[in-house]
Image: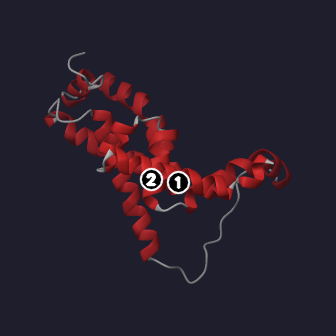
Amino acid sequence: MTGNDPDQDLVARVGRGDPAAIQALVARKLPRLLQLAHRMLNDAAEAEDVAQEVFLRAWKQAPTWVPGAARFDTWLHRVAMNLCYDRLRRRREQPMAEPPEQVDPGPAPDRRLLAGDTGSRVNAALGALPDRQREAVVLCHYQELGNIEAAGLMGVSVEALESLLARGRRALRAALADLRE
């Protein structure tokens, strides 16, 4: 490994078409990308589509990746966030006359209520946040990025990120206040 980017050698191998490197990169990055996209979109199928598109772009970028400009992981997160925002914009632009019929593949309602009520309430509260606040909370709390890296990814100052985080946390606390009782 060279430089500050722990993925630099792996990306170089991917750029040369090394199948083992491709598998290793997917194994290393896929879970976090899926988690990020799912938290942003609240839709597992769309999250998988976003992750697939991120990796397609990564394969295209890998042969010409220039180390040092940005960490590869940061670049992957930025691509994923941009794709999520594209999908969120399209959702707003395409109102439906009627909601689509969906089959609930989950467990029986009583089990889901007991097991998933808190998680779904948190996801709903997270989904209700303004986009930039949700992005800040997801990057810092769920993706475990530091404030400097998250701010860079979002294209804002660290102070602006901290302000977004504070407003997002306040809104989440207010929306979930009854859970603390």
Residue type, numbered disc 1: Gly
Whether residues under marks 2 and 1 lie with C-beta atoms below 8 angstroms apart, the answer is: yes
**Residue 80 seen from this side:** no
Residue at position x 36%, y 47% from top?
A: 159
Q: Nearer the viewer, residue 131 or 26?
A: 131
Who's the residue at 81% across and 48% down the image?
Answer: 181
Nearest the eye: 76 or 60: 76
Task: Decide if residue 121 is in sight here.
Answer: yes
Position of residue 154 measured from the top left corner of the image (x, y, whole percent): 33, 49
Give the labeled residue for mark 1. Answer: 168
Q: Quadrant of the N terminus?
A: top left
The residue pinned by badge 2 equals 164
User: Callout 1: few (<14), some (14-19), or many (20+) C-alpha neighbours within 10 Å?
Assistant: many
Residue in the foreground of this view, choosing between 76 and 145 = 145
Query: Does 4 sit left or right of 38 as displayed?
Result: left
Q: Say few, some or many: other residues with alpha carbon within 10 Å of mark 2 (under 14 / 14 to 19 / 20 or more).
A: some
In percent of the image, x 60 and y 81: which residue is there? 98
Judging depth in this view, the residue of 168 and 52 nearest the camera is: 168
Q: From the top left corner, tell me how far across and down residue 162 is, in percent.
A: 43, 46
Distance in Å between CA atoms under marks 2 and 1: 6 Å
